[in-house]
């Protein structure tokens, strides 16, 4: 068993405090995970407030999402494991329930959001120019998480990889090679979600 659990747990705790400070994980919403050196995952325990995480709120699961310490991970663990399985270079997955992503998911038409010509797109891993459109799919909310994970995989099989996806009226998932990379994606996408919502006419009163 690898000995990197504690430092990675601290990274998730810090990410939780930052994301909570921006109002992107209200109440006990959201879940965060990171891949350990031995292939296991560190993930937030179900039902914990992400702005007040402690080491006791981070647990260990195997690559299939099975608890290794008797505690209960998020019900959405299969969405995390599917991403790690698909992307061997991914080291962290972050899932906020931000108001901006929820609003934009409700405004999106055709089950997708297309982002183009934003300089900030270059903050996303693998994006070298803002001129090429980045398509983020929006999936219907589904309490059958295994079915939702299969739907995400099928979309990527058909349309190619994406740096993030949204779940309608729920939140979004993004990922990166490290916790800090994934956090950079969260911050960049949140600004783009806000701008896109305004362009769609959902301006603040």
Image: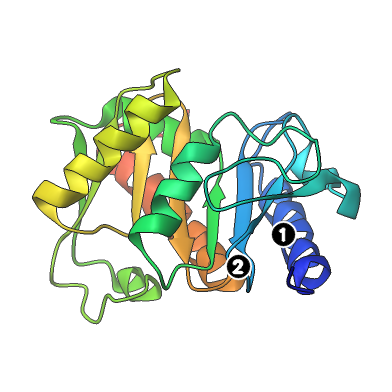
Q: Is residue 185 left or right of residue 130?
A: right
Who's the residue at 72% across and 59% down the image?
12
Q: Which mark is residue 179?
A: 2
10 Å crowding of disc 2: few (<14), some (14-19), many (20+): many
Which residue, as the protein is rendered here, is positioned at the far front? 1
Which residue, as the protein is rendered here, is positioned at the far bottom? 128
Who's the residue at 35% across and 29% down the image?
148
Which residue, as the protein is rendered here, is positioned at the far top? 143
Res 102 quadrant in image: top left
- Residue 94 vertical placement versus 78 (above, below): below
Q: Nearer the viewer, residue 42 or 201?
A: 42
Task: Give the CA separation, mark 1 to mark 2.
Answer: 7 Å
Q: Which mark is residue 85?
A: none
Q: Are marks 1 and 2 in contact (CB under 8 Å)?
A: yes
How many marks do you count on the picture? 2
Q: Nearer the viewer, residue 66 or 8?
A: 66
Q: Is residue 34 left or right of residue 200?
A: right
Q: Position of residue 21 (x, y in %)?
A: 73, 50
Quadrant position of the N terminus in the picture: bottom right
Q: Earlier in the sequence, mark 1 or mark 2?
A: 1
């Amino acid at each position: 068993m690898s000995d990197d659990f504690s430092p990675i747990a601290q990274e998730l705790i810090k990410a939780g405090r930052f994301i909570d400070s921006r109002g992107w994980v209200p109440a006990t919403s959201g879940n965060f995970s990171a891949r350990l050196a031995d292939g296991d995952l560190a993930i937030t325990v179900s039902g914990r407030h992400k702005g007040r995480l402690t080491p006791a709120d981070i647990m260990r699961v195997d690559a299939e999402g099975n608890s290794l310490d008797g505690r209960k991970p998020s019900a959405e663990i299969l969405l995390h494991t599917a991403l790690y399985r698909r992307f061997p270079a991914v080291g962290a997955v972050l899932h906020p329930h931000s108001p901006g992503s929820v609003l934009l998911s409700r405004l999106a038409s055709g089950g997708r959001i297309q982002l183009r010509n934003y300089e900030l797109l270059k903050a996303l891993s693998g994006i070298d120019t803002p001129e090429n459109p980045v398509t983020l799919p929006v999936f219907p909310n589904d309490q059958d998480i295994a079915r939702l994970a299969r739907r995400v995989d099928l979309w990527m099989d058909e349309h190619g990889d994406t740096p993030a996806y949204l779940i309608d009226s729920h939140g979004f998932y993004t990922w990166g090679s490290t916790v800090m990379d994934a956090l950079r994606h969260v911050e960049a996408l949140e600004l783009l979600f806000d701008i896109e919502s305004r362009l769609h006419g959902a301006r603040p009163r």
